[in-house]
Image (cartoon, grey):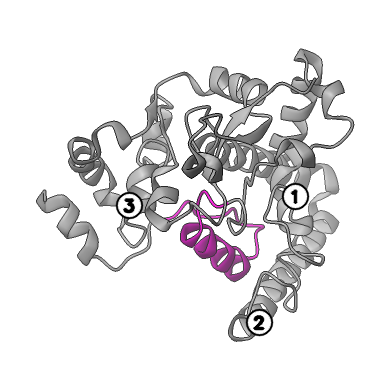
């Protein structure tokens, strides 16, 4: 086994795409940990959980066209992050309302609830600070200096994570087929050009991140180079420019459907489809 992989296993710092400043820190930390524990599971993954065809809303067929895709992508990139935090949009289905701000919600267990209160207090403190800042500088100034950059960061956060977990070649699994390794490998590295460095390579080292989530980010490139020959065909990467990839994935990855293979063992493996008729 290459030394880089062994080093990955022995490190203790967490590699993660850090949430933006307006996010509830501990709340997202705990849901993101569960995402890492259940990646690719249709039953237990926490984010970007695809729907099966039977779960597609009635209006989806009217959005399955260029204009509809543009509207969907615009809403996803501008409102997707706050909608996920507040209403669990695109998240795992729970038997009751789930919200990252609710300490007693189904996302969290009893040991985590105090930290959710702390996160909520932090959000309230920042909100109050912005309120006072708007009073001193004006609402337009705050929207320009804080709101604009926040929208850009939110858009990139959603786009990066969406593209890491959405691709026609990525399977999803129900409980009969899923295991941790299958899920960890159901991710894809993307190429953002010069932005790879801007984003500290969270874009093009995501497979390694899911295999070794305790690895510090400064070893991610080394680890990725090491795992490629080990994983072979199981390593997923796509160098399609991200703006083209967003459009393609929005078009081709509408819902998931069981494997068409007649082999009964494949019935718990789901692949993206886009035919709604």
| Earlier-in-chain disc, 2 versus 1 | 1
Is disc 3 placed on a helix, strand or loop?
A: helix
- Within 10 Å of the Cα at label 2, are there few (<14), some (14-19), or many (20+) other Cα atoms? some
Q: In this image, 4 relative to 87: left or right?
A: left
Residue at 51% from the left image edge and 24% from the top image edge: 242
- Within 10 Å of the Cα at label 1, are there few (<14), some (14-19), or many (20+) other Cα atoms? some
Q: Which mark is residue 113?
A: 2
Mark 2–mark 1 CB contact (< 8 Å): no
Q: In this image, 210 relative to 4: left or right?
A: right
| Earlier-in-chain disc, 3 versus 2 | 2
Q: Which mark is residue 89?
A: 1
Front tag of 2 and 1:
1
Front tag of 3 and 1:
1
Is disc 2 placed on a helix, strand or loop?
A: helix
Quadrant including the C terminus: top right
Q: Position of residue 162 (x, y in %)?
A: 58, 38
Residue at 85% from the left image edge and 37% from the top image edge: 57
Q: In the rendered picture of this protein, how many numbered marks are placed on residues?
A: 3
Q: Where is residue 232 in the image (x, y as percent from the top left)?
A: 24, 34
CA distance separating discs 3 and 1: 28 Å
**Residue linked to disc 3:** 217
Residue at 37% from the left image edge and 58% from the top image edge: 213
């Amino acid at each position: 086994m290459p030394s880089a992989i062994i080093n990955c296993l022995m490190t203790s710092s967490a590699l993660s795409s850090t949430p933006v400043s307006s996010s509830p820190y501990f709340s997202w930390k705990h849901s993101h940990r569960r995402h890492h524990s259940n990646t690719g599971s249709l039953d237990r993954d926490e984010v970007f959980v695809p729907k099966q065809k039977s779960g597609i809303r009635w209006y989806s067929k009217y959005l399955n066209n260029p204009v509809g895709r543009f509207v969907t992508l615009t809403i996803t990139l501008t409102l997707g992050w706050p909608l996920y935090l507040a209403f669990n949009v695109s998240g795992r289905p729970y038997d009751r309302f789930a919200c990252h701000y609710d300490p007693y919600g189904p996302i969290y267990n009893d040991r985590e609830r105090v930290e959710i209160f702390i996160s909520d207090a932090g959000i309230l403190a920042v909100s109050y600070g912005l309120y006072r800042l708007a009073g001193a500088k004006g609402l337009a100034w705050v929207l320009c200096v804080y709101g604009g950059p926040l929208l850009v960061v939110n858009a990139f956060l959603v786009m990066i994570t969406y593209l890491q977990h959405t691709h026609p070649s990525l399977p999803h699994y129900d409980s009969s087929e899923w295991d941790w390794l299958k899920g960890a490998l159901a991710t894809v590295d993307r190429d953002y050009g010069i932005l790879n460095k801007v984003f500290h390579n969270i874009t093009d080292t995501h497979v390694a991140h899911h295999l070794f989530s305790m690895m510090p980010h400064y070893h991610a490139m080394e680890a990725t180079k090491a795992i490629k020959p080990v994983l072979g065909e199981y390593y997923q990467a796509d160098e399609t420019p991200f703006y083209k990839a967003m459009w393609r994935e929005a078009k081709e990855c509408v819902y998931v459907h069981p494997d068409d293979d007649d082999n009964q063992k494949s019935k718990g493996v789901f692949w993206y489809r886009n035919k709604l008729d």
